[in-house]
Amino acid sequence: MNIGLIILGVIILIVIVLISMYNKLVKLRNNRENAFADIDVQLQQRHDLIPQLVESVKGYMEHESGVLTRVTEARAAAMGAGTINR
């Protein structure tokens, strides 16, 4: 009877270890999937922000173009001035 209890105890211990290992593997798999999902979310957010960045650069480019034109005109006027008043 003692040998039967020892064998039953070993079998129960092996089953507990196998269940524990399986649960650990499932947990690791879920962590990996969550990590890849987080990366996908970050990449999608960056992709969604690109049109906004392009529009803001276009607006700034128009502003800078106007400033450059006015500075060039002012420089030309200053170089062509005959007196200090003009």
Image (tube, rainbow, N blue to C red):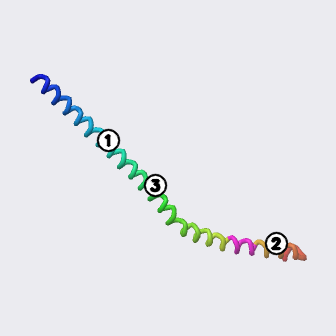
Residue position for label 2:
75
Query: Which residue is drawn at the image coordinates 20% and 32% (left, top)?
Result: 11
**Residue 23 sits in quarter:** top left
Name which of mark 2 and mark 3 comes first in the sequence.
Answer: 3
Magenta part of the chain: 64-70
Q: Which quarter of the rendered picture does the C terminus lie within?
A: bottom right
> What amino acid is labelled 2 in the image?
Arg
Instruction: Mark 1 vs mark 2: give the one in front.
Output: 1
Alpha-carbon span between mark 1 and mark 2: 73 Å
Please identify, in this view, whether the residue under mark 2 or under mark 3 is nearer the observer.
3
Instruction: State the separation of the CA atoms marked 3 and 1.
Output: 23 Å
Specify whether 18 is left or right of 72: left
Q: Quadrant of residue 64?
A: bottom right
Picture coordinates of residue 51 (x, y %)?
54, 69
- The residue shown at (33%, 43%) is 25
Q: What residue is pinned by disc 3?
A: 39
